[in-house]
Amino acid sequence: MSTALLARKDFEDAIRSRMIWAVMGVFVFLMGIIAAGAATDNLSEAEPTEVIGVVANIGGLLLIPIMALLVGYMAIVGERQSGSLRVLFGLSHSRWDVFAGKLLSRLGVIAVASVVACLVAIVIAVGLFDDVPIRTFLGFSVLTILLGMAFTAIAVGVSAIASSRMQAMAGAIGSYVVFTLVWHPAVTAFHYLVEGNLPGLEAPEWYFFLLSLNPLEAYRAVSSELAGQFIWPMVGWQTMVEDIPEETLEEPNALLLSNRVSGDLPFYLSDWFAAVVLLAWIVVPLAIGYWRFERADLN
Amino acid sequence: MTAIETTDLTKRYGEETALESLELTVDDGEVFGFLGPNGAGKTTTIDLLLDFIRPTAGSATVLGYDTHDETDAVRDRVGILPDGFDLWERSSGYRHLEFALESKNGTESPEALLERVGLDLKDAERPVGDYSKGMAQRLAMAMALVGDPDLLILDEPSSGLDPHGIRTFQEIIREEAADGTTVFFSSHILGQVAAVCDRVGILDDGELVTVDTIAGLRERSGVGSSLVVDVAGEPSTEGTALTEIDGVTEVTADDGRLRVTYADPAAKALAIHRLVESGPPIVDFETEEATLEDLFSAFTGVDGESVREQGAVADEPKASQKTVADGGVSADTDADEEEEEVVR
């Protein structure tokens, strides 16, 4: 009851934020330009699922995580720093009510944004192609929403632990930097230590498993499989730290997981396991965040 | 029943002690003033009572409920006006009240609450981001009153308020008290605490120095008020038996004047009466009231400046000169210390 009340109130406030609408506007604008450009091309060779590649790249790997971090990082520490947390407690809300209410509200905001992003993808696909594999698109949509939620959960978890806005901002930016810049080279370095060489085009399954524990990588890898084309991450570490032949840059589909692992994909590299990874990124940061928030001195 | 009871309540941050073994009892239905300079530990105490922070040692109950184990029960029955808060600036004042009413299952009408705290309905419809500090303070007071709390905790309620707003708040406090609500009034301004409170606790540097009524504080502090009488001829205390009057603490004669110091104001009329009957002829007389600042410094050893209302006249020219020379910001105690430095 109390949680729902707080969630509703916070959602009201959050959707009045111009920042959210600005990021959404940028996304829709970019997608519009790309769609208009594509509409004038010869699409007879193209597959409708290629739309997924574009949306996953701009929306999934860049705008949705950033928007989720922006929406979430001030959720709790903002109230704590401004002193309004005392007002909320004075109105007989508990720490759990505040934590859960804020989380639900911010998850709601990101769910709306992710659904819009996916609807844009579906509308463009239906507009440009006759025969659209809707199930693939729905699967992609679920994955995108999960990704948005994972980053919201990370941001809210950080926000519950941080005692100042600067700390929360550092945590939010830091998490994105780790996932895009640090994770892949770190796993590659581990591979080098274990195997004595850099991973080539074919690499052990555990190498890909460690990579896919990164929520952005899990999302990217499965989206690639759904789209049937290799989706480049924000930073193409494959070409920098892995020992892969030059030609693959011409034919990046060789980098698809299914082409780099011999035989069938093991379960921990399958699409549903990516969903499990994303769920873990929702549950774990929240659990840690609430655990710390519950014990913190809030002044 | 007791509204607030703390036992050995202590809060430390590392080496620093914010509150030391606080033993405080606030009775049901009283208006209790919690007085101390900024940084004395008043907000720390309130934060402990509402479980915003956890004690290093000791415990506390509010309305009979343990502050940590029964936080929900405490918060359901308490209204709080915190110190230094922002509200949700994109949302209107009216919406804030609706939220407070829903949160506390309050049955009051928002309009009635607005009127009590002196906010226009028109202002209430504007987003709170446009409010002045005083308006936000009034709105927060209205939110604190929602649901008719059994205990009202006010932390520096007058900050940002104009004199009219301060009077409005004092009326509200009296109305609530008449209605049986316990009021815990925390402030660094003596005059305001004295204006509404039944009893006062003085907190200084994390320690509770004393708890008493204002009159009791006056009496025990020894800083009585005095009656200063100009007499014709050489003043003498002979034959008047002034010191035998109940409530008179000291009689001195100096510089052509007779000074009668008393703790009980009723004593001064009797003193005048005896002087007229048997003393030297009276030329003129005046009374010098002990200020609340004097009272405060008597108990804490701290200069009264730190608890004086801002803008009140600093009537000690020497002190104000020193503060000006110091950049006009430091409290007198600092100025004194720095003067010593110079002398050395």
Image (cartoon, rainbow, N blue to C red):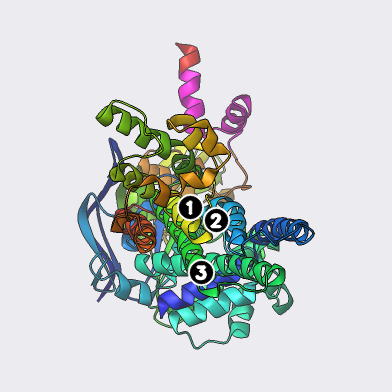
Residue A77 versus residue B57: which sits nearer the camera? A77
Q: Is label 1 or label 3 in front?
A: 3
- The residue at the point 56 percent across, 56 percent down is A56
Q: Secondary structure at mark 1?
A: helix
Amino acid on which the number 2 mark rests in the picture: Gly
Q: Is label 2 or label 1 in front?
A: 1
Residue B87 image offset from top left, x and y in percent: 57, 63
* Magenta highlight range: B316-340
- The residue at the point 53 percent across, 87 percent down is B108
- The residue at the point 52 percent across, 35 percent down is B331
Task: Determine contact: label 2, label 1, CB under 8 Å.
Answer: yes
Label 2 neighbourhood size at 10 Å, few (<14), some (14-19), many (20+)? many
| Mark identifier at residue A60 | 2
Task: Provide the residue designation for mark 3.
Answer: A136
Question: Magenta includes B337?
Answer: yes
To which chain does the residue with label 1 belong?
A: A
Amino acid on which the number 3 mark rests in the picture: Thr
To which chain does the residue with label 2 belong?
A: A
In the rendered structure, the answer to whether residue B76 lies left or right of residue B58 reads right
Task: Provide the residue designation for mark 1.
Answer: A220
Please identify the quarter of the rendering in which residue B134 is found. bottom right
